[in-house]
Amino acid sequence: MGAGISTTFQNSATVLSIGIFFSLMIAGLAGVLPGALTHGLTAQGVPAADAARVAALPPVGVLFASLLGYNPVQTLLGPHVLAQLPAGHADYLTGRAFFPALISPPFSDGLSVAFDFAIAACLVAAFASLLRGGRYIHGDRHLAATRAAAEQCPDASASPAPAPLTSPEPSARSSPKLFPQPYARPSPAPPPPPEGPR
């Protein structure tokens, strides 16, 4: 039963920790990602209105796109915006180098927030564990009570020790023989001496 309760708490803590981790990641991305998107898109010739529209989107999609290895710039901008850009800039925006380089600083800030919270939680847990004291053994209370009861009793050396209980030795008549002797036949009588001459 104890193992089942421990496993239940571990599974619940795992789900809770994942939720807290991603929430902190999103909070860290939300503070830095809009500015990085606006600056990076306008530097490649994207109109400011379109760049502001993309930067105002929630950072959840950008986070999961980065985890899946997907570049969402083409979907976010749309084909009508990419058609207005030079071919080299459009290829760079939809390639494999622009999006990872764009989200690296915001992603690093989000990881810093999550790791700072993890360090703070570990310090709080260590302090709470320190307040518990030393190692507790369940037999200590019973052992202390036994010693206290032994100290309250009078000294056993002052009274004479009782004589040891001994069982009486069985008598030879009352105790049956385990191994009786075999029956001995009587020896025959000696023959009479021979009679002499008369």
Image (cartoon, rainbow, N blue to C red):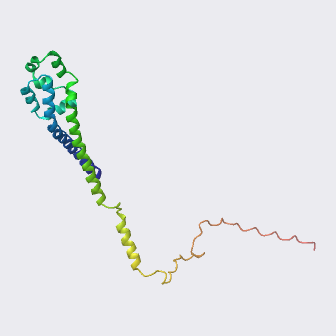
Q: Position of residue 82 (x, y in %)?
A: 11, 19
Left or right relative to 81: residue 146: right
Residue at 29% in and 56% down: 129
Q: Position of residue 170 (x, y in %)?
A: 57, 75
Image quarter for residue 147? bottom left
Residue at the far left in the pictured view: 49
Q: Position of residue 165 (x, y in %)?
A: 51, 77
Please determine whether, in this image, residue 109 is positioned above or below residue 196: above
Mark count = 0
Residue at 31% in and 58% down: 130
Q: Nearer the viewer, residue 56 or 49?
A: 49
Residue at 27% in and 52% down: 123
Please determine whether, in this image, residue 123 is positioned above or below residue 73: below
State which quarter of the image contains the C terminus: bottom right
Q: Nearer the viewer, residue 79 or 103?
A: 103
Image quarter for residue 71? top left
- Can see residue 1? no
Residue at the far bottom in the pictured view: 159
Left or right relative to 80: residue 105: right
Residue at 9% in and 20% down: 81
Q: Nearer the viewer, residue 48 or 188?
A: 48
Residue at the far right in the pictured view: 197
Residue at the far front in the pictured view: 43
Please determine whether, in this image, residue 120 is positioned above or below residue 74: below
- Can see residue 101? yes
Q: Position of residue 18 (x, y in %)?
A: 21, 41
Image quarter for residue 31? top left
